[in-house]
Image (cartoon, helix red, strand yellow):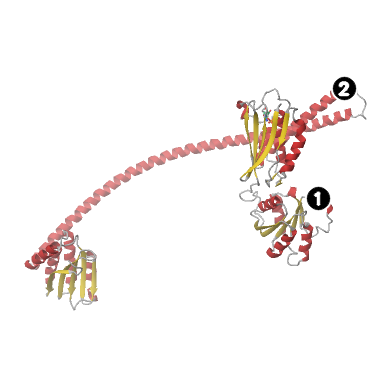
Amino acid sequence: MTGEPVPVLRMLLREEHDVFVLRQRGREVAAALGMEQQDQVRVATALSEVGREVPRAEVTFAAATEPYPHLVIVLSSAAVGNHMLEGVRAAGRLMDEVRVEDERIVLTRRLPAQVDPERLEQAREELAASMPTTALDELSVQNRQLVTALEQVQAHRDELLQLNAELEETNKGVMALYTQLSEELEQTNQGVVALYAELDERSAQLRDANEAKSRFLANVSHELRAPVTAIIGLTRLLLDPRSESLTSEQTHQLELVQGSAADLLARVNDLLDLAKAESGRIEPNWGPVDLAAVFGQLRGTLRPLARPEVELAVDEPPAAGLVSDELLLTQILRNLLTNALKFTDRGTVGMGAWVDGERLYIAVADTGTGIPFAEQSRVFEEFHQVRGALQTGGTGLGLPYARRLATLLGGALTMVSEPGEGSTFTLSLPLRPAVPADGHDGEGPLPHVDRALVVDDDPAARHLLRQLLAGIADQVSEAADVRSGLAIAVRERPSVIFLDLRMPGGDGTLLLADLAALPEVAGIPVFVVTAADLSGFGPHELAHARSVVTKEDLTRRTVVDLVAGLGS
Ligand code: ADP
């Protein structure tokens, strides 16, 4: 076979009842080309549908190979036209394609396989030999086909009914399984809900107990402080050389009373500190921390506490640019160093610091008694002390307080200890305080400005302000000196300026004066933020500042309040 369709049979439709012959020939051609029974009926029916509407036509049956094996039937007649829509539409549903062209209709249907030339020749001969039958014969063939089709439909329907029944059965099974699973899930859920309720209740009880304890500690220590302070005052009065003279024994006894009262006061103060930290009443005062100064001060004040055979070695800390609470940090470190010096009778007590990523680590290590393994988890509990030769005084409140403060600063305090070898306490702190996720403590909406400018020579202070302005200013520009501060102010026209006073290369007051002299920036509100002692400044020098805040008072709250005040 070539690409061109190869004709198999030609016939002429002369009269109306020739349509039966067309039908029959169509079926025979389809059968001869290997089509299945069903497809034979399709071809035959399609032909009778279009044949009815083109009574006088020349019909060609051909086999084509391209692009796939298919049967092509062409009905040519001058009567072909658009009036035959119904028959063409019906045939279109039975064949792959039915085209109405100029004076001809072309019907195609895919063949199950290629027909080799030999078989084609044979088909052609058979078809030529077979005589067209009568209309009656064709009608009976058609009836038989109809009966077969009806039987097939019935069989399909039976099959469908059976499938439906099976599906229904399966559905019932699935539903039963689903119900069972739902019940189990519901039971599990009920269990989980009950468990959570119990947990909630337990944590509420714990919270209550904790609050009651803190309240008790705070009340008791307050109550104790007044009488103890009074005792100390009275003993001081009695021991005053200007008071009536006492016997040496009386003096000695009074000194003992005074010593005990001072001891008691120290413990009561410890209790009060802890109670305050626990109830969250200590709010860190964030600011740049001068680590070298903190380390230097601790080195100086604690050296006298070291026993003769103990060396206190405090390393130089790295320049970490730490932003934290210097006072609270000093308290934690003093506590750790005092403990280390107290429980070490020979060797070294050392303190060193290093930065790793966004955190600062400070370790206090000693070669002292160490802490027995069984006690290690308990030394952070309130009032817990380990029995031992070096155990004198103390309250057992130092470590829990230190850990509490570390948590307040966003850090952690951990310990490793080898009994008889020594202990190392490590404090880890974030280099910068974390800004709360919503950037605020939840009291109403945040104030807002488009752009803020921070002028400060200290990068840590600029960073702190940037953090404090998070969520308040859309953009924060920074300048390290007065000159670039003025340039940025003129260029960017910020909504607000935070200005440091003491800066190398030009005082902040110069910028205040320059800003006031330039009409385009004179209206920008300036907050002076300074660590400087303001007594050296005349009132006129700060006249153009909206307000003055000390660096110590610079908290998130202050910044929120300052910016909020701009609107009014
Ligand atoms: P205090 O020092 O007032 O007793 P702390 O809470 O500071 O209370 O410490 C609790 C206990 O932990 C101490 O009594 C001591 O037994 C133990 N401890 C703390 N630091 C050290 C250390 N560096 N070496 C050995 N033991 C320590």
| In-front residue for pair 53/514 | 514
Above or below, comparing residue 554 to residue 98 in the picture: above
Q: Which residue is mark 2?
A: 250
Query: Where ligand 1 lies, by image quadrant?
Result: top right
Above or below, comparing residue 238 to residue 411 in the picture: above
- Quadrant housing the C terminus: bottom right
Task: Tell which residue pokes out farthest to the bottom in this image.
Answer: 78
Res. 12 image quadrant? bottom left
Percent across and percent down for residue 537 are 83, 54
Q: Secondary structure at mark 1?
A: loop
- Quadrant housing the N terminus: bottom left
Residue occupying image coordinates x 27% and y 49% = 164
Label 2 crowd (10 A; few <14 / some 14-19 / many >=20): few
Residue 397 visible (yes or no): no
Q: Is residue 94 left or right of residue 477?
A: left
Q: How far is mark 2 from mark 1, CA to CA? A: 48 Å
Q: Is mark 2 within 8 Å of ligand 1?
A: no
Res. 352 image quadrant? top right
Q: Is residue 291 left or right of residue 160?
A: right
**Label whose residue precedes the other's in the sequence (2 or 1):** 2
Label 1 crowd (10 A; few <14 / some 14-19 / many >=20): few
Residue occupying image coordinates x 18% and y 75% = 76
| In-front residue for pair 233/319 | 319
Q: Which residue is mark 1?
A: 533
Q: Amino acid at mark 2?
A: Gln
Q: Secondary structure at mark 2?
A: helix
Residue 388 visible (yes or no): yes
Q: Amino acid at mark 1?
A: Asp
